[in-house]
Amino acid sequence: MNDEQIQKVINQYVKNREYQREYYRNRYNSDEEFRTKAKDSAKTYYINNIDKRKELYETNKEYIQAKRRYRYWKKKDDLEGFKNKYPHDWETFFNKIN
């Protein structure tokens, strides 16, 4: 594909996304019946699958907590402090990143 064809495909994609966004906003987002049905569906799904969410958290609990600590220290721009304070987490999960 040459540059002109690539640009044409990108423009078509952007136009399609804008059309879909406006279609949803005008047709569904303002329709109260649709919104209540969607909320009820989401609530039912959450209630039926709450045990799966807990199980997923419990199996990955150590990694999730380590990731939170890593992001905190990275936000402070002090990864050396993270490495010194949590060497087990660094060696287990994040050593391959850097």
Image: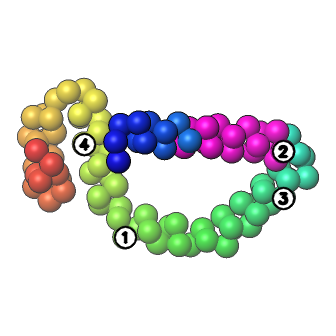
- Asked whether, in this view, residue 10 is left or right of residue 29, the answer is left
Marked residue nearer the N-terminal end (1 or 3): 3
In this view, the mark in front (3 or 4): 3
19 drawn magenta:
yes
Q: Residues within 10 Å of mark 3 (few under 14, many from 20)?
A: few
Marked residue nearer the N-terminal end (4 or 1): 1
Label 1 sits on a secondary structure element that is helix
- Mark identifier at residue 59: 1
Which residues are the magenta region?
13-29
Query: Quarter of the image holding residue 57?
Result: bottom left
Read off the residue under disc 2: 27
Marked residue nearer the N-terminal end (3 or 4): 3
Read off the residue under disc 4: 70
Query: Quarter of the image holding residue 49?
Result: bottom right
Give the CA distance from mark 1 to mark 2: 41 Å
In this view, the mark in front (3 or 2): 2
Q: Amino acid at mark 3?
A: Lys
Label 2 sits on a secondary structure element that is helix
Q: Are marks 1 and 3 in contact (CB under 8 Å)?
A: no
- Mark identifier at residue 46: none
Q: Position of residue 74 (x, y in %)?
A: 23, 34
